[in-house]
C-alpha cells in the first residue's frame, strides 16, 4: 500500500514539475521570438516529452538533460543569430545525445564528467560574439581557475550530484553575464521592463544565486571534511558565503581601480548605485539563508527526531578552554 502511494505521489510530482517547465518554455519562446501560440506550445510539448523520457531512467538523468538543453539553447541564442527552429533542433539533438550516452554509461558516477563536458562546450559557444571582449577575458580570470580547481579536487573529494548540478547552474548564469557584462544582459532588461524596475537586475540575480546555489555544496564540504553537525552545519555555509561575497567585491574594486576607464566600469557594473557592493553581498547572504532553510526543512521531513537531537547536541561543549589555558597545557607537556 505504501509503495503504491509512494509511486502515485512521485508520478504526481513529476507531472507537476514537467507542466511547470512546459509552461516556462512556452512563455519564454513566445516572449523571446514573438511566435504564434501553437508554435510555442508544440516546442513546449516536445521538450516535456524528452524530459519525461529521461526521467523514467532516474531524476538525475532528467536533470542532466534539462541542464544541457537549457544551457545550449540559451548559449546558441545568445551567441549566434540563428532562428528559433535551428537553435531548438541543435540543443534538442545535443541533449538527446548527452542523455542517451549517460543512460548507457557503465558507471553513473560519470554525472560530474558529463556536466563538465557540457559546461566547457557551452562556455566555448558563449565566447563567440561577446559584447566586450576585454571584459569577457577579465571575467574568466576567476572562471577558469575555479573549474580547474574543481577538477583537481574531484580526484580525492567528489561532491554529490546535487552539488555539481547547483555549481553548474551558477557557473552558467555567470558565463552568460560575462558574455554581455552583467549590467547589460537582455534578460535583465526584460525583467526591468516587465516589473517596472529601476535598473537591470541580472547582476543581483547572479549574486543571489551565488548564495542560494553554492551554500549547499559548501555545507557538504563542512560536513564531510570539517565534521560540522547540527546548527553549525547550517550556520557555517551562510557565514562563508557572506565572507566570500565580500572578498569578491574587493576583487571587483581592485580590478576596477587597476584597469580603470570603460573596462573598469563595465567590470564593476554598479549602474550608478553607490551601495551596489553592499546590496550584492546582502542578496548573496539572503540566498544562502534560504538555501540552508530548504536544507533544514528537507532533513526535518525525513528524520525530525534524530535531527532535533543533533541540533541540541551541537551546542554541547566538548573541550576545555583554549587560548592561554591551552598554551599553559602545551607548556607543561
Image: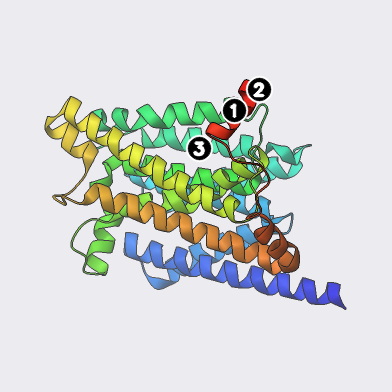
Q: Residue furthest right?
A: 1
Q: Position of residue 147 (x, y in %)?
A: 50, 31
| Residue on which disc 2 sits | 332
Q: Name the element at disc 3.
A: helix
- What distance separates the C-alpha of mark 3 from that of mark 1? 53 Å
Is residue 96 found left or right of 324 in the rendered image? right
Q: Position of residue 80 (x, y in %)?
A: 34, 41
**Of marks 3 and 2, which one's residue comes earlier in the chain?**
3
Marks 1 & 2, CB-CB < 8 Å contact: yes
Q: Name the element at disc 2.
A: helix
Q: Nearer the viewer, mark 3 or mark 1?
A: 1
| Quadrant of the image containing the C terminus | top right
- What distance separates the C-alpha of mark 1 from that of mark 2? 6 Å
Is residue 218 found left or right of 141 in the rendered image? right
Q: Position of residue 199 (x, y in %)?
A: 20, 58
Q: Name the element at disc 1.
A: helix
Whether residue 203 is visible here, answered yes or no, is: no
Whether residue 34 is visible here, answered yes or no, is: yes
Measuring 59% from the left and 31% from the top, which residue is drawn there?
Answer: 326
User: How packed is label 1: few (under 14 Cα within 10 Å), some, or many (20 or more)?
Assistant: few
| Residue on which disc 1 sits | 328
Label drawn at residue 119: 3
**Of marks 3 and 1, which one's residue comes earlier in the chain?**
3
Is residue 268 found left or right of 12 in the rendered image? left
Q: How many marks?
A: 3
Q: Nearer the viewer, mark 3 or mark 2?
A: 2
| Quadrant of the image containing the N terminus | bottom right
Amino acid at each position: 500500500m505504501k509503495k503504491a502511494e509512494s509511486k502515485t505521489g512521485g508520478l504526481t510530482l513529476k507531472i507537476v514539475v514537467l507542466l511547470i517547465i512546459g509552461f516556462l518554455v512556452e512563455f519564454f519562446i513566445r516572449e523571446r521570438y514573438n511566435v504564434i501560440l501553437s508554435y510555442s506550445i508544440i516546442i513546449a510539448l516536445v521538450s516535456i516529452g524528452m524530459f519525461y523520457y529521461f526521467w523514467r531512467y532516474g531524476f538525475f538523468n532528467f536533470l542532466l538533460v534539462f541542464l544541457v538543453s537549457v544551457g545550449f539553447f540559451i548559449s546558441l541564442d545568445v551567441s549566434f543569430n540563428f532562428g528559433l527552429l535551428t537553435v531548438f533542433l541543435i540543443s534538442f539533438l545535443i541533449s538527446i545525445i548527452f542523455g542517451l550516452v549517460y543512460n548507457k554509461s557503465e558507471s553513473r558516477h560519470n554525472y560530474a564528467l558529463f556536466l563538465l563536458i557540457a559546461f566547457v562546450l557551452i562556455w566555448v559557444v558563449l565566447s563567440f560574439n561577446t559584447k566586450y571582449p576585454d571584459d569577457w577575458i577579465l571575467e574568466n580570470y576567476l572562471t577558469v581557475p575555479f573549474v580547474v580547481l574543481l577538477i583537481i579536487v574531484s580526484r580525492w573529494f567528489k561532491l554529490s550530484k546535487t552539488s555539481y548540478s547547483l555549481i553548474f547552474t551558477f557557473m552558467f548564469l555567470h558565463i552568460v553575464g560575462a558574455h554581455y557584462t552583467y549590467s547589460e544582459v537582455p534578460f535583465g532588461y526584460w525583467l526591468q521592463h516587465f516589473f517596472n524596475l529601476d535598473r537591470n537586475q541580472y547582476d543581483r540575480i547572479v549574486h543571489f544565486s551565488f548564495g542560494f546555489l553554492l551554500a549547499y555544496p559548501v555545507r557538504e564540504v563542512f560536513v564531510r571534511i570539517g565534521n560540522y553537525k547540527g546548527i553549525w552545519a547550517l550556520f557555517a555555509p551562510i557565514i562563508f558565503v557572506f565572507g566570500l561575497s565580500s572578498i569578491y567585491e574587493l576583487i571587483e574594486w581592485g580590478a576596477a581601480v587597476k584597469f580603470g576607464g570603460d573596462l573598469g566600469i563595465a567590470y564593476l557594473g554598479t549602474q550608478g548605485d553607490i551601495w551596489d557592493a553592499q546590496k550584492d553581498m546582502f542578496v548573496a547572504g539572503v540566498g544562502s539563508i534560504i538555501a540552508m532553510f530548504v536544507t533544514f526543512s528537507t532533513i526535518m521531513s525525513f528524520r525530525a527526531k534524530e535531527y532535533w537531537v543533533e541540533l541540541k547536541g551541537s551546542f554541547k561543549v566538548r573541550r576545555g578552554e583554549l587560548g592561554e589555558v591551552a598554551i599553559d597545557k602545551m607548556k607543561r607537556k
